[in-house]
Structures are given as structure tokens and as C-alpha cells.
Image (cartoon, rainbow, N blue to C red):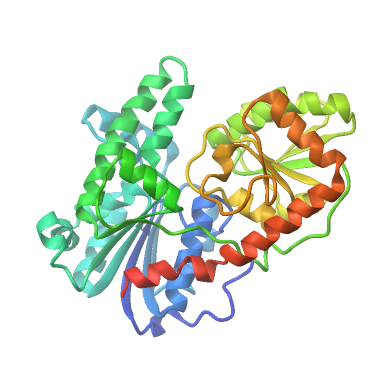
Amino acid sequence: MTLDKVPADIRPAVEGHRGDILMLCHRIPYPPDKGDKIRSYNMLLHLVRSGWRVHLGALVDDPADMEHCETLKALCASVMLVPVSSFGSKLISFFGVLRGNSMSVEYFRSAQLQRWVDEKAASLRLRAVLCVCAPMAEYVFRSPALSSSSRPSARAESRHLKLLMDFMDVDSEKWRDYAASAGFPMRHVYGLEAALLRRYEQKIAARFHHVLFVSEDEAGVFRERVCAAEGVSGLSNGVDMDTFAAMPPVRNHRMFFCGAMSYLPNVDAVEWFARSVFPLVREVLPDAEFFVVGSNPASRVQHLAAIDGVTVTGKVPDVRLYARDAALCVVPLRIARGLQNKVLEAMAMARPVVATPEAVTGIAGRANHDFVVERADAEAFSSAVLALLREPERAEAVGRNGRRVVEEKYRWSSCLKGLDDLLQ
């Protein structure tokens, strides 16, 4: 998407009057071009707008993102960005498993970032620590100044320092889903990671003051399958209503899917749709087109471009251009956790959405009114797609209804009010 600079209403971070917050992210929260970065970036903006001085520590897995350091410095009181080597981190993760540690936790460990966290915790009177993604809790547990506040005996007594974890999704369940759909030997690798990460999530819930998820549905999954702890709640994702403005309807037979195309659930979704569903659509509408829009397409995704009518774009400067020219957004996720930004953004642009039940879990709205829901069955899903493509008036009504839902329920300013309550 096209990214705006720091909003004009953001005052210099050093003017924050409410105190200092340490924010630790497993991935740099800028540019906001994928689900977790969109959420963490908007949390950061909200904290600064609310008068907090934010000290940001983040890992950077894409070297090109280092160029955004100055943008973040305009928002934050201090910034530490640490590049991570994919190969090196994966090797460390492997040996970490041999010691009984989660691969995810080991992957995101950095001695450089730990030293910075220790320095900030010792030199500042922090009011809160906000960790984004489970592995960032390790920096709290390993910090002499912070670890005492995370002991169960001290947690209830701590008044000046709040420890908050934004899990976003129940990652241990994601790994369990991977295991269920994988073959040998990866199902055993994924199953082991699910068990190790679940144990780590339980530790976090016991030692942090509050843990957050992208929806109440996802928080409920955590309570039911991981830990029935106090201080567990949903904090919904939102949508930038100006960036994702409503678009005029288009009457053609073009569909699009948008997401990070190296991410396994997205890869599985577009491969299934392109190979199993799209041919059934083309039998009825020979001019139908399917655009797969997103960065770093896996080889499995790149091969889909050989199918007539399928286009794999790779990274694009502005995903909205593809939404503008398409009649329909398809979200055929068969593996999904949390709240799908891709669904909310398509709804915000008044594009009718056809999705699996997994893709709309936790999203307010009525099935077959604000979006169309169909199970991951090729015949059934293709019929749902064809019905909208052949009935443009109905498709346009679904698009309008979806936009209305997002306007009413998914503005970032209202979605993040719960964060203010936790920081009182």
C-alpha cells in the first residue's frame, strides 16, 4: 500500500506527559504493510497521541526496513532496531529446541537488544512495558530490573509498572494447526513447537499483568485451550478509514487476494483457490481473473502464474490499486488465527468479500449480508463466487454493507480505547 508519513497531529515524543513506556516488537512496526506491523504501528501512534513517551525496541528481519529508523525516531523518545539474520536465527532456534525451548522464542533473541532493554529499565522510571508477540517476553524475564516485577508474588503488588503482552493470536494453536495439515516429518516438528510455545504462553499469562488478543474470540480460545488466567481480553484491530476509503463498484470478473505471500496460511489459501476453485469459476466465466497480491511469494505461489487467468504480482507499491480494479475479494483461508486485516480492509473499500468461516472469525457482521461465508469446499466456494460475479447488484450491496460495519465498529481510535484503560 502507499504509506503516509508520520501524521501531522503527532507531537514530539519527548513532550509526552504521562510517563515512559517500553515497547518491544518482534518486527519493526514500520512500514505498516502486514498484519502484525499494522497493529503494532497503530498501537504506537495511539500511545504517543495519548501522551506517553515511547521507547521502542524492535527486531528487523528485512534489511530494507532499516531505512525507516528516522521515521520511528520522529515518534519515539528513543529507538533501538536490531537486524536479525534469518539463517543464524533459525540455527539458534534449532539448538534451542534441544534445550527444551520454543523455536519462536529462540529465533527472536538478541544480546544487543537485551542490553538496551536492561539499560532503559535501569535508567527510566517506566510506567509500563508492552511486548508485542510472545517471544518478546524473554527480554522482560532476562532483565534484572524487570524480572522482579514479573514474579507472580510481585505482580499483584506492582502499581508503578504494568507488564502487558499483546499476543495478537494464540500462536501455539497456529502451530498445532500447522501440524494437523503437514506430512511427516514436519507435523512432528510443528507439534513440538506447539507444545513448547503453549508452555511459554502459560508462563507469560502467570507473570504479566494483562494479555491481549486481536478479538474476544481469540481470547476465548486462549482461556479454553491454554490458560484460564485473569487479565485476558480482546483488543480488536482497526482500519484506517481514510487510507482504505470506499471505492466505486466495478462490474467485471476480476478477483483479488492480498497478503504476505511467504506466510503458510496465505500460501495454502491461494494455492487451493487457484488450483481447485478458480478452474470451476472459469468454466462458467472464461474471462475470470485472479490476482494474488503480496510480497515475497513462495515458489508454490509463483508457480500459480502458469494457470490461465492467474496473476502473481509480488510486492506492489499500493495494494489499493488492485482492489480498485476488481469486483470481488476472496479470502479462502483454511488455516487462520485471529482477526484478518485483509478482510477488514476489503470491507472498508466497499469490496464484497467471499471468505471461509476461518477467515471471518471474530469479525462483527452478518454472513451473506456484510460478507459472504462459504466452507472450504471447491464446488460450494466457487458457487458463492459465481453468484456475486453474476449478480453485480447483490455484490454491490454486500460491499456497501461491509463498509458500514467497518465504519461503525473498526476505527482504530475506538478499538484501542481498551489500551488506555489498562494503562490507568
256 relative to 161, above or below: above
Quadrant of res 191: top left
Q: Which quadrant does the N terminus fall into?
A: bottom right
Is residue 421 or residue 32 the one in the foreground?
421
Judge from the rendering whether residue 302 lies leftward or rightward of residue 33; answer left or right: right
The count of marks equals: 0
Quadrant of res 421: bottom left
Give x and y (percent) for residue 69. 49, 64
Judge from the rendering whether residue 145 lies leftward or rightward of residue 45; answer left or right: left
Q: Residue at x 84, y 27 (%)?
A: 282
Can residue 69 be seen from the camera position used here? no
Judge from the rendering whether residue 83 lies leftward or rightward of residue 113; answer left or right: right
Is residue 416 or residue 106 the one in the foreground?
416
336 relative to 146, above or below: above
Q: Residue at x 22, y 46 (%)?
A: 203
Give x and y (percent) for residue 201. 28, 44
264 relative to 66, above or below: above
Give x and y (percent) for residue 67. 54, 60
Can residue 159 be seen from the camera position used here? yes
19 relative to 180, above or below: below
Is residue 387 or residue 179 the one in the foreground?
387
